[in-house]
Image: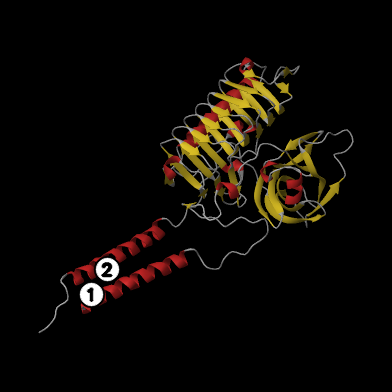
């Protein structure tokens, strides 16, 4: 008597075949539909980029605040600037404050300040409209909770609040751009940082927030905040970027370091995007990378300029800041002179430098609180400084400088800031968020892997299809 297999066998085999084929096709479609993002273009800030803080209804501070850059208010008058101890310049065009390394501007000051501020505020509003209107690559990431994530360059959009309860990492190259469109509030928790890796630059990060932005105590934030309402920095919070608010900015013993402004040609908008105000273009400088010779902590410089002819940069350790010059804030690790030779002009330098972890530990300084200072005349200018990584007993940094010659590497002891290592358990790898996965950060030259990322994906899909076909044949034989 002929035996037949159970009636469910063929159905089970066919069902398994369908499931495996479906999974394989979904994976293949993912590879085809989302191969990576060509890259978001920068948001042009216009003359708003000339300010570390720009607000329409007021700027107030308590405690010992330090602002590297200009601040301004418009259309409100200077009476809305509180806690800065302003001294009006004889020209009546601006004021000075011991808390601000730049100048302080208000709409009731003398010509041409009111007109310039009107333009700056208009540029700020246009920049917000541009950033908030970009077509997103990813929507509702993490339902608004992005702590612990490593986020690749691109445009991200939320209809909800966005909260950063633990450290978040933005990983990408020095020319990559991040735009975050937030329909409600933005909050970062106490002691938590926004970490930049792989050479990512704070000036290429834009947070377009419709609600209020709040930086909690001793948090460290990177990027340009374009807020349609208010920006609040609580005690000890640090911002590397700009606070551009269409209402008020409130400070409490904070440090804000303005970053180099993106030019109009760099911020050329993508076709179909909301175009911001266009400024005259000029001839862009050539970008080259050179190793720095000598005994200083700076080992490499990426330069933008003209007229290079066998450029050489020498770093020499100095014994002090020089006669009549006070030391920069904090504890100084090293004074140094960077001396370039054989060039016509240098517009900007991205400097890579090292500080021993033993020195940091001995002075109770965390790597996040290291700053490279540049001597501008007789005053020290804090440069936008980024921790790249710690490795082999040393901390690696990059800093953006407008020029050369005298520098100081210094650090300040403050309440501890949670680093990526403490915020994310070693046993857990933070999820890499689409749309693109950049190369891992390193301060030294590396060779890219010869195997494209899609090769193992295709191999996995092929294996799934083979399993499906084999399962189907077994089902038929049965």
Name the N-terminal-most of marks 2 and 1. 2
- Residue 210, compared with residue 385, is above or below; it is above
Which quadrant is home to the N terminus? bottom left
Other residues around mark 1 within 10 Å, as few (<14) / some (14–19) / many (≥20): some
Q: Is residue 254 left or right of residue 267?
A: right
Please tell me which residue lies in front, 328 or 477: 477
Q: Is residue 128 left or right of residue 418?
A: left
Residue under the image location 66 percent in, 43 percent down: 368
- Residue 428, compared with residue 456, is above or below; it is above
- Residue 25, compared with residue 365, is above or below; it is below
Please tell me which residue lies in front, 471 or 406: 471
Q: Residue furthest bottom?
A: 1
Q: Give residue 116's position: percent from left, percent from top.
A: 62, 24
Residue under the image location 28 percent in, 63 percent down: 19
Q: Give residue 157's position: percent from left, percent from top.
A: 44, 41
Q: How many marks?
A: 2
Which quadrant is home to the C terminus? bottom left
On residue 475, the disc is 1
């Amino acid at each position: 008597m002929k035996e037949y297999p159970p009636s469910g066998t063929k159905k089970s085999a066919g069902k398994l075949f369908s499931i495996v084929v479906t999974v394989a096709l979904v994976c293949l479609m993912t590879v085809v539909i989302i191969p990576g993002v060509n890259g978001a273009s920068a948001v042009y800030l216009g003359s708003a980029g000339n300010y570390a803080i720009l607000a329409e209804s007021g700027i107030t501070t308590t405690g010992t605040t330090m602002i590297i850059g200009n601040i301004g208010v418009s259309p409100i008058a200077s009476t809305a600037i509180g806690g800065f101890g302003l001294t009006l310049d004889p020209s009546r065009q601006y004021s000075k404050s011991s808390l601000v390394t730049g100048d302080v501007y208000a709409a009731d000051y003398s010509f041409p300040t009111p007109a310039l501020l009107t333009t700056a505020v208009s540029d700020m509003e246009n920049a917000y409209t541009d950033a908030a209107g970009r077509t997103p690559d990813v929507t509702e990431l993490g339902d608004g909770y992005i702590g612990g994530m490593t986020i690749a360059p691109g445009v991200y959009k939320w209809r909800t609040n966005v909260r950063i309860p633990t450290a978040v990492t933005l990983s990408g190259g020095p020319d990559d751009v991040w735009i975050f469109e937030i329909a409600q509030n933005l909050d970062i928790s106490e002691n938590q940082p926004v970490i930049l890796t792989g050479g990512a630059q704070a000036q290429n990060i834009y947070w377009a927030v419709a609600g209020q932005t709040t930086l909690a105590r001793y948090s460290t934030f990177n990027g340009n905040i374009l807020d349609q309402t208010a920006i609040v920095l609580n005690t000890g919070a640090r911002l590397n970027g700009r606070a551009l608010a269409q209402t008020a900015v409130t400070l409490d013993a904070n440090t804000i370091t303005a970053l180099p402004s993106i030019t109009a040609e760099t911020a050329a908008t993508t076709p179909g995007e909301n175009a911001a105000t266009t400024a005259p273009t000029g001839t862009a400088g050539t970008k080259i990378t050179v190793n720095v010779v000598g005994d200083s902590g700076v080992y490499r410089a990426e330069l933008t300029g003209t007229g290079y002819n066998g450029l050489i940069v020498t770093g020499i350790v100095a014994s002090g800041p020089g006669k009549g010059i006070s030391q920069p804030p904090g504890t100084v690790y090293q004074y140094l002179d960077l001396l370039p030779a054989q060039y016509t002009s240098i517009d900007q330098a991205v400097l890579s430098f090292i500080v021993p972890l033993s020195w940091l530990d001995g002075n109770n300084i965390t790597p996040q609180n290291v700053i490279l200072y540049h001597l501008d005349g007789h005053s020290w200018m804090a440069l936008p400084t980024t921790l790249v990584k710690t490795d082999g007993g040393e901390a690696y940094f990059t800093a953006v400088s407008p020029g050369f010659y005298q520098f100081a590497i210094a650090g300040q002891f403050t309440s501890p800031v949670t680093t990526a290592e403490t915020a994310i358990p070693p046993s857990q790898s933070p999820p890499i968020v689409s749309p693109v996965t950049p190369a891992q950060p390193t301060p030294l030259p590396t060779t890219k892997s010869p195997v494209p990322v899609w090769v193992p994906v295709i191999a996995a899909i092929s294996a799934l299809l083979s399993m499906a076909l084999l399962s189907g044949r077994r089902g038929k034989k049965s």
